Amino acid sequence: MRFEKWQALGNDYIILERAQLPFALTAARVRRLCDAHLGIGSDGVLELSEADADGFVARLRIFNPDGSEAELSGNGAREAVMYLRRRGWTDRAQFSIQTAAGEIRPTIHDDRTCALAMGRARLQSADFPSGGADGTGTLEATGQTWHFQHVQVGNPQCAIHVPDGDALQALDLPRIGPGIERHPLFPNRTNVSFFRAEAADRIRARIFERGVGETSASGTGACGAAIAHVLRGGDSPVTVRLDGGELAVDVDESLLFTLTGWAVPVYTGELAPELLADLAGDEPA
């Protein structure tokens, strides 16, 4: 069975076409595929299939390495979009794909860059049910008090402003992140971004991703941090500097937002019959 591995700012995904899969993607199978020793090794799995509604090129499902399904991934969606174009699913520069978070409308700029019209962000959602109209809140985790901005960008984001650059860099995200991701305020867990302004239209951000942990880059995490920055008075479009590189996020007054960045293939491979047999078994470890 053929697969491709792609990466965007160091955030890598295995891309599979549903029509070629001999089995459904269970959580255990996703974990096995993402395991660097027992599988391929990846930050997640993207499954592409024919759309079940008119007007869409494909349906995209996104899985985290812990086996959970994500509503959306900005880096993963860009990788899927560029894969669809490269593999001949469409020859258009503008089209639509289905995701669990709704319609995503990409515009392809060149052979590695695209912009994703991601819809309108919301400050109130079921992912932060006790939150007010402005989405701000305070929580206690790891013995500290954190003031945050909740933003629903297709998945839940908890954006935390850190005014000092040295303090931002010194944060121990593997220790701090889990307590925020799984805080009782967030019944569906949450992604977490820590950011500071470097200029009116530029921020530095670090990301702790739900179901992943600290990551070198997250498209939706960048969007959450950029929107929080704009809500604090920052200028749009926002350049977001992540560990893996830079993304651009354009946010308008109604919180419609667009994410622009690159994605490239790493390699094409074929799953060995032995691995396929293991995966086809009853819930592989």
Image (tube, rainbow, N blue to C red):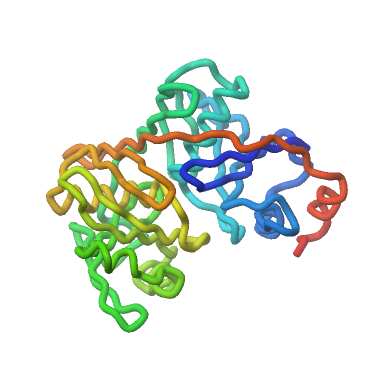
The image shows residue 193 at horizontal and vertical percentages of 34, 59
| Residue 180 x/y as whole percent | 38, 70
Relative horizontal placement of residue 238, taking residue 32 as reference (left or right): left
Say whether residue 75 is left or right of residue 144. Answer: right
Residue 137 position in % (x across, y down): 23, 68
Please identify the quadrant where the N terminus is shown. Answer: top right
The number of numbered badges drawn on the structure is 0
Identity of the residue furthest to the left in this view:
233
Q: Name the residue located 27 percent from the left edge and 66 percent from the top edge.
A: 166
Image quadrant for the C terminus?
bottom right
Q: At 58% from the left edge and 23% from the top edge, which residue is drawn?
A: 86
Q: Which residue, as the protein is rendered here, is positioned at the far top? A: 91
Q: Quadrant of residue 189?
A: bottom left
**Residue plotted at (59% across, 34% down):** 265
Q: Is 285 left, or right, of 83 in this rendering?
A: right
Outermost residue toward the front? 166
Name the residue nearer the viewer: 246 or 226: 246
Is 267 above or below relative to 220? Answer: above
Vertical order, 42 against 265 (above or below): below
Relative to 285, residue 12 above or below: above
Can you tell which quarter of the image residue 136 is in?
bottom left
Percent of width and height locating residue 278? 83, 55
Residue appearing at x 51%, y 24% in the figure:
54
